[in-house]
Every structure is written in C-alpha cells, then in structure tokens.
Image: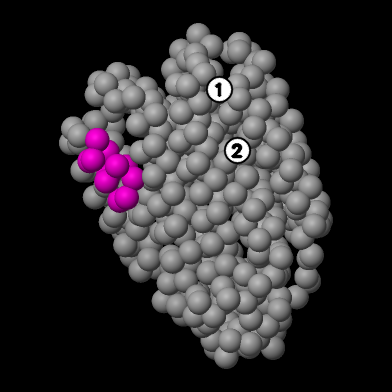
C-alpha cells in the first residue's frame, strides 16, 4: 500500500473519506434516535412531550456549540484525537442513558454528554477532511460525506424502530453503544490528520505546493473569528444555516414521527417515511456535491431553501401515508443538500485551513436553529394541539433564507486571514 502511495497510484485520502463516512453514519444514526424513541420514552416514563423535546433541544444546542471548538482544535491539533475523544463521550453517554430514571439524568446524558460528543465529530469533521485532503473533487467528497449522514438515517431509523418495539428503548441504546465502540479501532489505526503526515499533498493541489507547505500556519480561533465576523458573508452563511437547522434536524427530524402518529399512522410506518427521506437525502446530497463543483453555490442554496419552504408550507394539509411518503421524497432531496455549497462558500471566503474554525461557528448557528425548533415544535403541539403553526413558520423562514443566500458575495480565492493574523 505504501509503495503504491509513493508512486501516486492510490491516494490515501480516499481511505480517510471511507473512515470519516463510517463515523458520520454512526453519528447520524445516534442523532436520529430521539425521533424514534421520544414516544416510547414518554409512554414508559410519563415525562411530557415538551420535557422530552427540551432534552432533545439541549442536546442539539450542545451539538452546535461543540462544533466551533472542535473545529478550532482540529485546525490546531488535527482530527484524529478529536474523533477519539468524541467517540468515547458518545459511548459513555449511551451506556449511562440506558439506566436513566430521572429528568436530570435525561438532560445530562441526552443533552450534555451526547450533544458534546456528537458535536466533536459532526459535520465539521466532513468540512475539515474534504478541505485538507482535496482541492480537486472537494464538492464531490462533501457530497459523499453528506450522503453518509443520510445513509445513517436510512440504515438506523428502521433498525432502531424495530429494536425499540422488540427489545425496548433501553436495550436498543446499548446496541448503539456497541456500534459506536466498534469504530474506535479503524480510527486509531488508519485515520491521519492531513496529507503532509504521510508525505503527500492535497489531491489536485498545484505541483509547486509541497506537503510541507500545503497548509498555512495555524491561526487561533479568536484571530480567525475576529476577521470572519467583520464580513457580511459570515452572518449570511450563519443566518441561512440557522434556518437549515430549524427546518430540518430540529423540526422534521424530531417531530415528523409524532406528527404522523397524530394523523393515525403507525410508528413503524412513520419511521419508514423518515428512512425514505434518508434515501432521497443520500441522492440529493451527493448530487449537490457534484453540482457544487460546477455551479454557483449561492444559486444552489437559493433553490434548495425555496424548494424546502414550499414543501413545509404544504405539510399541514398532508395527513395520509401516501401524502407523507410523497413529502418525504420531496423534502429528503434537499434535507442536507445545503451542506456542500455552504462549506464550499466558507472555504472560498475564509480559506481552506480555517474551514474547521469558521464552519464550526456557522454549524453552531445551524444547531441553535435546530434546538429552537425541536423545543418549540413540542411546545406548539401541546399548546394548540397540532404542528400546523410550526410547519407554516418554518416554511416562511426557508423561503427567506433562499433570498438571503443570493446576497452572499462569492470569492474565488479566500482572503488572507492566515497572513493577516500572522
């Protein structure tokens, strides 16, 4: 293998992509679990839907706030150690969650530990891997890794629902812990921080860029963000991604199954609809990566958000299994298709080596939106007896985000954040 690497016959970055994909599949399965377990947990514990929604919301919030710090640490020390720490936290939170009996344990294990652990190895890992290892085909790699997240939803949702119905939600959580533990070995043995670690340059980098100089010197998170937050591009990217999290992970990812049950649809059928959404998401995200390499990412974002907004505005009038399956197909096509163009714009605007830091904060905005929607969705359902108002508000926000995406000033070359900080 090493001799082939030296001759340039095989690029080791594809192994890194494969390992990262496995990590994201597992993390995605874990993050989709609340949508499956929220009703069984309510039935066993008697905790209210708003309490469980708030716990899910706190986990999403910690997931988001962990991202920029993990991104900054990845920029400084590399992804490998960060991934190992994140996996250990996730495994600990799952084992502890299987034994929880009180609400404070719910918030500690589902919120703090799980949110922090998954935040350390979330989408920021995709951005860092794609930006460090690839110049050519970066959009395609982002699409593949986004597709891995979709695949996690596709694989785990039906599996988790079947397990919950057959062995209970507590034993199902222990099964998830074993799956995440199995990822530790390939990460420890095979994951590398960047091409220079094995004497390579990023794939598609100009020949004059040597491994030793392929990446500029590390810039501290504070210095990087001081410059990033002075640009309108950062706030436009963060604002549109806030809406992305609000409308996808927070609202639909958490509350589609309870909404389907309200419509008289069984939980296993509803989980199948989320899995169908994951399948379409897989197609949509990989296609989005391919499109990002070829077309203006701003226009892609405008189309994705506009399409999402229209589908959400229609959702309150969709209440049959066939109708919800049709919604799952439409919504799934751009569920996280926004990720490749957003990361591409961050890399173009703020620099390849600063992607972990800057995108970490953009991703934090995503999960602030997700946390808010997860909580407000449950509160709205309990207050007015339906999700209609929540779906309508989310649709309006998505259309607004589409118009804001077109205001982002795209740069073909990143500004000299590193040089300015130095």
**Structural crowding at the residue carrying mark 2, measured as other residues with C-alpha within 10 Å and reported as few (<14), some (14–19) or many (≥20):** many
Q: Is residue 150 left or right of residue 327?
A: left
Residue 110 lies in the magenta stretch: yes
Q: Element at badge 1?
A: loop
Q: Element at badge 2?
A: helix
x%, y% of residue 188? 33, 65
Task: Name the residue rendered at 29%, 42% in the picture.
Answer: 107
Please tell me whether residue 24 is drawn above or below residue 198 in the rendered image. above
Residue 34 lies in the magenta stretch: no
Residue hosting label 1:
387
Task: Name the residue rendered at 48%, 64% in the picture.
Answer: 68
x%, y% of residue 106? 27, 38
Quarter of image, res 213? bottom right
Residue 152 shows up from this direction: yes
Start and end of the magenta stretch? 103-113
Residue 140 shows up from this direction: no
Task: Name the residue rendered at 75%, 75% in the picture.
Answer: 413
x%, y% of residue 72? 47, 71
Residue hosting label 2:
247
């Amino acid at each position: 293998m090493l001799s082939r690497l030296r001759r340039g016959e095989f690029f080791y970055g594809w192994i890194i992509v494969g390992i990262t994909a496995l990590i994201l599949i597992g993390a995605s399965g874990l993050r989709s679990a609340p949508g499956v377990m929220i009703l069984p947990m309510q039935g066993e514990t008697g905790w209210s839907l708003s309490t469980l929604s708030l716990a899910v919301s706190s986990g999403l919030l910690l997931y988001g706030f962990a991202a920029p710090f993990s991104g900054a640490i990845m920029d400084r020390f590399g992804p490998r150690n960060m991934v190992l720490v994140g996996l250990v936290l996730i495994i600990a939170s799952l084992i502890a969650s299987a034994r929880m009996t009180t609400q404070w344990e719910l918030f500690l294990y589902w919120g703090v530990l799980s949110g922090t652990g998954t935040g350390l190895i979330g989408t920021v890992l995709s951005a860092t891997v794609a930006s460090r290892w690839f110049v050519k085909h970066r959009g395609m790699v982002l699409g593949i890794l986004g597709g891995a997240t979709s695949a996690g939803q596709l694989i785990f949702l039906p599996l988790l629902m079947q397990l919950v119905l057959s062995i209970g939600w507590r034993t199902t959580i222990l099964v998830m812990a074993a799956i995440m533990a199995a990822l530790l070995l390939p990460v420890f043995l095979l994951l590398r921080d960047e091409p220079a670690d094995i004497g390579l340059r990023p794939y598609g980098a100009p020949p004059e860029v040597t491994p030793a100089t392929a990446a500029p010197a590390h810039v501290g998170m504070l210095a990087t963000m001081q410059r990033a937050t002075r640009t309108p591009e950062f706030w436009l990217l963060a604002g549109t991604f806030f809406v992305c999290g609000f409308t996808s992970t927070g609202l639909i990812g958490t509350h589609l199954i309870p909404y389907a049950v309200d419509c008289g649809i069984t939980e296993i059928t509803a989980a199948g609809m989320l899995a169908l959404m994951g399948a379409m998401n897989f197609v949509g995200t990989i296609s989005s990566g391919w499109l990002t390499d070829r077309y203006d990412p701003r226009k892609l974002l405008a189309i994705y958000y506009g399409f999402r907004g229209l589908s959400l505005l229609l959702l309150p009038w969709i209440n049959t299994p066939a109708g919800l399956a049709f919604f799952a197909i439409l919504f799934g096509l751009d569920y996280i298709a926004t990720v490749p163009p957003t990361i591409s714009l961050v890399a173009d605007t703020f620099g390849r080596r600063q992607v972990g830091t800057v995108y970490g904060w953009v991703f934090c905005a995503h999960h602030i939106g997700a946390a808010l929607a997860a909580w407000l969705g449950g509160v709205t359902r309990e207050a007015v007896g339906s999700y209609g108002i929540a779906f309508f508000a989310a649709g309006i926000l998505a259309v607004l985000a589409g118009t804001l995406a077109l205001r982002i000033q795209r740069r073909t070359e990143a500004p000299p954040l590193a040089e300015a900080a130095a």
